[in-house]
Image (tube, grey):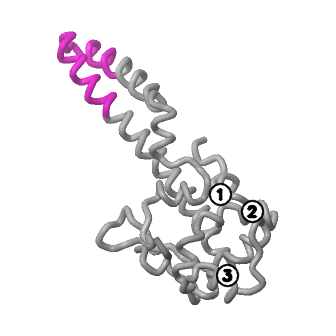
């Protein structure tokens, strides 16, 4: 299907943005670390149960109180960790996407989605992506028009079809990649 016929995606979740930038999505992090927040659960359960028994509650009631407190502690730890990841991901995304003269705008109606828009014009963004592609190879375009003609694409189509190249800009120009920009978000 040619670029002129295909509906190009310009709205993304944070997990999809992570994929474009070559870093792990939150879903992958959770899948890889299913017990990452279990220590919060275990510690809170033990402490709350011991305290409840000390306060004179029977075993069953103490366990029920401990279970509720432990689930809340685990949920809070998970939420705090997600918040750190989200902030780090947005920082990395805004930096790398900004280097390509693009911006992310959070949708008002669906706040988990971000729309990709040009900071100036789609042609300016296409020129920056062309620079990244040229620096990485295996393609070389002498100018933006040649890049657009290769589709053929409009400037918007060229940008949206080639977003996957953004993650390579750091390697080409010696800037920070998404992983480095995210830093130690999980510490």
Measuring 73% from the left and 71% from the top, which residue is drawn there?
132
Q: Quadrant of the C terminus?
A: top right
Q: What element carries label 3?
A: helix
Q: Is mark 1 on a helix, strand or loop?
A: helix
Q: From the viewer's perspective, is residue 12 above or below residue 44?
A: below
Q: From the viewer's perspective, is residue 185 above or below residue 66?
A: below
Residue 168, percent from left and from top: 71, 62
Give the magenta part as a residue range. 48-71
**Which disc is residue 147 wearing?**
3
Q: Distance between the residues labelled 2 and 1?
A: 8 Å
Give the mark, 3 or 1, whose residue is nearer the N terminus.
3
| Left or right side of 58 for 125 | right
**Which disc is residue 122 wearing?**
none
Q: Main secondary structure of the magenta part?
A: helix
Question: Badges 2 and 1: C-beta atoms under 8 Å apart?
Answer: yes
Q: Nearer the viewer, residue 49 or 101?
A: 101
Measuring 54% from the left and 76% from the top, which residue is drawn there?
103
User: Disc 3 vs disc 2: which is toward the camera?
Assistant: 3
Q: Name the residue under label 2.
A: 170
Give the mark, 2 or 1, whose residue is nearer the N terminus.
2
| Left or right side of 36 for 65 | left
């Amino acid at each position: 299907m040619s670029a002129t016929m295909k509906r190009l995606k310009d709205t993304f979740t944070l997990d999809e943005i992570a994929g474009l930038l070559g870093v792990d999505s939150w879903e992958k992090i959770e899948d890889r670390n299913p017990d990452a927040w279990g220590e919060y659960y275990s510690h809170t359960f033990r402490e709350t149960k011991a305290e409840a028994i000390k306060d004179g509650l029977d075993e069953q009631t103490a366990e029920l109180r401990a279970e509720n407190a432990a689930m809340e502690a685990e949920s809070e730890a998970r939420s705090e960790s997600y918040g750190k990841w989200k902030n780090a991901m947005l920082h990395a995304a805004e930096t790398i996407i900004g280097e390509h003269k693009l911006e992310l705008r959070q949708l008002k109606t669906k706040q988990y989605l971000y729309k990709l828009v040009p900071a100036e014009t789609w042609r300016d963004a296409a020129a920056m992506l062309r620079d990244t592609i040229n620096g990485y190879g295996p393609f070389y375009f002498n100018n933006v028009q040649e890049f657009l003609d290769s589709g053929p694409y409009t400037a918007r189509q060229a940008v949206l079809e080639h977003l996957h190249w953004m993650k390579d800009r750091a390697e080409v120009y010696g800037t920070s990649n998404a992983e480095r920009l995210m830093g130690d978000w999980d510490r």
